[in-house]
Image (cartoon, helix red, strand yellow):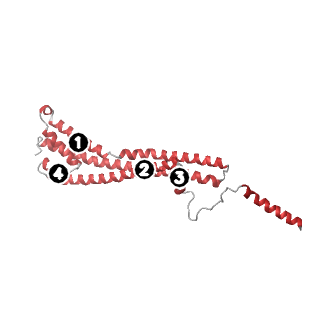
């Protein structure tokens, strides 16, 4: 009987010794119910300054690309309406001057018409030695080129985001994996539960980079196509205006 009690006491002491030798280790806590220990919240909470800065850069790039996309779509829709209004009212006027006054203020079509009218007025002196056909054609061509430059504004942002966002996300992934390996090496444990979380959070960076880049690339190609259609209408208007000015002998009034 005494021997059994002694053995039981030794077993109890052997189980209590590890806890007494490591009093500073926290108890393992299960993740809260319904929470995702490997989601974006964990990525932000466990990331260092570089990881958080990478996420902020990707968010800013995404906001910039969506702002340009929406703004350019609105501008292109407005330009399309101005083109339809120009074709409906300009050619019904008695003169080029009256037709230009009927166009909306700020319309690219009015800008081209006023540029052509101004060119005919300045066709004197040294410029008068240049053929009227050549001078008016050059003036309309410069005005159309200015309109084309305005339609390209903002597209460089989409091109930049579309080409660099995947690499920014890849940088975040590499940095996250590096930090995960450092933590695993420091802890000395490389089990699947220790590796899956940090590496999975790092790979989210690549997904974020692609989520930022893909809409920017698709939006860029779409806007370029819409700009081409709009500029075809503008060039047709400029060509017809050139013909009208030559037919009237440069008289715009």
Count the labels in the image. Answer: 4
| Residue drawn at x 39%, y 52% as measured from the top left | 66
Report the quarter where the N terminus lies: bottom right
Q: Position of residue 175 (x, y in %)?
A: 55, 46
Q: Decide: marks 1, 3 in contact (CB < 8 A)?
A: no
Q: Which residue is mark 3?
A: 204
In the picture provided, is 104 more to the left or to the right than 4? left
The answer to whether marks 3 and 4 mark residues whose Cβ atoms lie closer than 8 Å is: no
CA distance separating discs 3 and 4: 55 Å
Residue 43 against residue 2 in the figure, above or below: above
Give the Cα distance between marks 4 and 1.
Answer: 17 Å
Marks 2 and 3 sit apart, C-alpha to C-alpha, by 17 Å
Q: Residue at x 23, y 48 (%)?
A: 108
Residue at which label 4 appears: 90
State which mark lies toward you, 2 or 3: 2
Which structural element holds mark 3? helix
Q: CA distance from mark 1 to mark 3?
A: 48 Å
| Disc nearer the start of the sequence (3/4) | 4
Mark 1 vs mark 3: which is more N-terminal?
1
Residue 186: give x, y in percent of width and height: 65, 47
Picture residue at 16% right of the left edge, 39% below the top: 119
Residue 70 is left or right of residue 180, and the answer is left
- Residue, disc 1: 143
Are the two marked residues, 1 and 2, in contact with CB atoms closer than 8 angstroms? no
> Distance of mark 1 from mark 2, alpha carbons?
35 Å
Secondary structure of the residue carrying numbered label 1: helix
**Dot 2 corresponds to which residue?**
60
Q: Secondary structure at mark 2?
A: helix
């Amino acid at each position: 009987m005494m021997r059994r009690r002694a053995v039981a006491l030794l077993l109890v002491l052997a189980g209590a010794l590890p806890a007494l030798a490591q009093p500073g280790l926290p108890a393992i806590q299960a993740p809260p119910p319904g929470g995702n220990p490997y989601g974006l919240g964990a990525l932000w909470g466990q990331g260092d300054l570089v990881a958080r800065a990478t996420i902020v850069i990707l968010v800013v790039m995404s906001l910039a690309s969506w702002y340009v996309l929406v703004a350019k779509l609105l501008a292109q829709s407005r330009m399309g309406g101005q083109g339809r209004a120009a074709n409906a009212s300009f050619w019904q006027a008695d003169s080029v001057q009256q037709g230009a006054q009927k166009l909306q203020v700020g319309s690219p079509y009015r800008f081209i018409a006023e540029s052509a009218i101004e060119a005919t007025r300045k066709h004197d002196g040294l410029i008068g030695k240049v053929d009227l056909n050549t001078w008016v054609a050059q003036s309309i061509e410069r005005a159309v080129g200015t309109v084309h430059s305005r339609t390209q504004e903002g597209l460089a942002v989409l091109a930049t985001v579309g080409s660099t966002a995947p690499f920014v996300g890849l940088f975040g992934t590499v940095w996250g994996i590096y930090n995960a390996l450092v933590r695993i090496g420091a802890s000395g444990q490389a089990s699947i539960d220790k590796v899956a979380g940090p590496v999975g959070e790092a790979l989210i960076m690549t997904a974020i980079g692609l989520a930022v880049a893909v809409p920017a690339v698709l939006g860029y190609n779409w806007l370029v196509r819409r700009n081409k259609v709009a500029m075809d209408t503008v060039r047709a208007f400029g060509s017809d205006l050139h013909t009208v000015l030559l037919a009237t002998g440069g008289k715009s009034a």
